[in-house]
Image (spheres, rainbow, N blue to C red):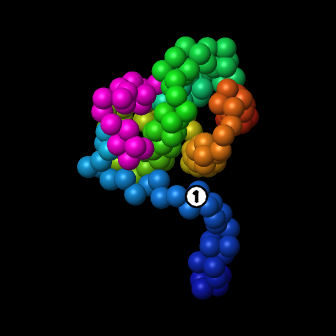
């Protein structure tokens, strides 16, 4: 019956989730895949950034739908297109932005970045709750940060798939 205790009670039950020191989410609607691609240090003539982006999203969707079975087709799904170590930075940024849009759609029915993939954003927002989306963002940011080390990329991808698979 004490009305002044309501707000402190609500605040005490909130969970603080630190995603990263890196500002992934400063992107606005005016930015696009090409800007992210160029921000990663690539030029247009080196690689098809649209193909890399599509590969990134297809990987995420197959992982969400097939779970650990995605490991059986990883060469076809990922390695045939993501052929160089430096492409991983771009692909993981795309995946993080995708989940950010899923979260934004879930909360506000808005999409900041993937307007061309709105159906995929909406489908994922229906399948995942907010906690699931945040966990995926945290995992992908963690793996993005691991890319700066000289790691075995095959083991890196296997470990990522297993960690995401535990959420499914």
Residue 9: x, y in percent?
A: 66, 75
Q: Relative to residue 24, is residue 39 drawn left or right?
A: left
Figure quadrant of the N terminus: bottom right
- For image coordinates 30% across by 33% down, the residue present is 44
* Dot 1 crowding, Cα within 10 Å, few <14, some 14–19, many 20+: few
Q: Which region shows up in magenta? A: 36-55
Q: Which residue is mark 1?
A: 20
Q: Nearer the viewer, residue 24 or 100?
A: 24
Residue 161: x, y in percent?
A: 67, 30
- For image coordinates 60% across by 26% down, the residue present is 63
Figure quadrant of the C terminus: top right
Q: Relative to residue 70, is residue 54 drawn left or right?
A: left
Q: Residue furthest left?
A: 30
Q: Relative to residue 64, is residue 152 drawn left or right?
A: right
Examine the rendered structure and indicate whether residue 149 appears above or below residue 79. Answer: below
Determine which quarter of the picture holds residue 164. top right
- For image coordinates 47% across by 47% down, the residue present is 100
Residue 2: x, y in percent?
A: 64, 84
* Magenta span includes 24: no
Q: Nearer the viewer, residue 120 or 109?
A: 120
Examine the rendered structure and indicate whether residue 160 appears above or below residue 22. Answer: above
Asked whether residue 161 appears in the rendered view, the answer is: no
* Magenta span includes 40: yes
Q: Secondary structure at mark 1?
A: loop
Examine the rendered structure and indicate whether residue 121 appears above or below residue 47. Answer: below
Asked whether residue 117 appears in the rendered view, the answer is: yes
- For image coordinates 62% across by 73% down, the residue present is 11
């Amino acid at each position: 019956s004490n009305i002044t205790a309501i707000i402190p009670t609500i605040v005490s039950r909130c969970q603080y989730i630190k995603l990263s020191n890196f500002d992934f989410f400063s992107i606005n609607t005016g930015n696009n895949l090409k800007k992210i691609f160029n921000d990663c240090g690539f030029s247009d003539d080196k690689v098809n950034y649209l193909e890399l982006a599509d590969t990134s999203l297809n990987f995420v969707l197959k992982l969400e739908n097939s779970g650990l079975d995605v490991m059986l087709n990883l060469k076809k799904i990922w390695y045939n297109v993501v052929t160089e170590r430096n492409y991983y930075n771009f692909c993981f940024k795309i995946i993080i932005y995708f989940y950010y849009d899923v979260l934004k759609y879930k909360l506000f029915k808005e999409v900041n970045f993937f307007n061309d993939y709105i159906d995929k954003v909406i489908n994922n927002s229906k399948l995942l709750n907010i906690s699931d989306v945040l966990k995926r963002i945290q995992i992908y940011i963690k793996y993005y940060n691991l890319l700066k080390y000289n790691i075995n990329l095959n083991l890196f991808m296997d470990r990522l798939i297993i960690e995401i698979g535990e959420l499914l």
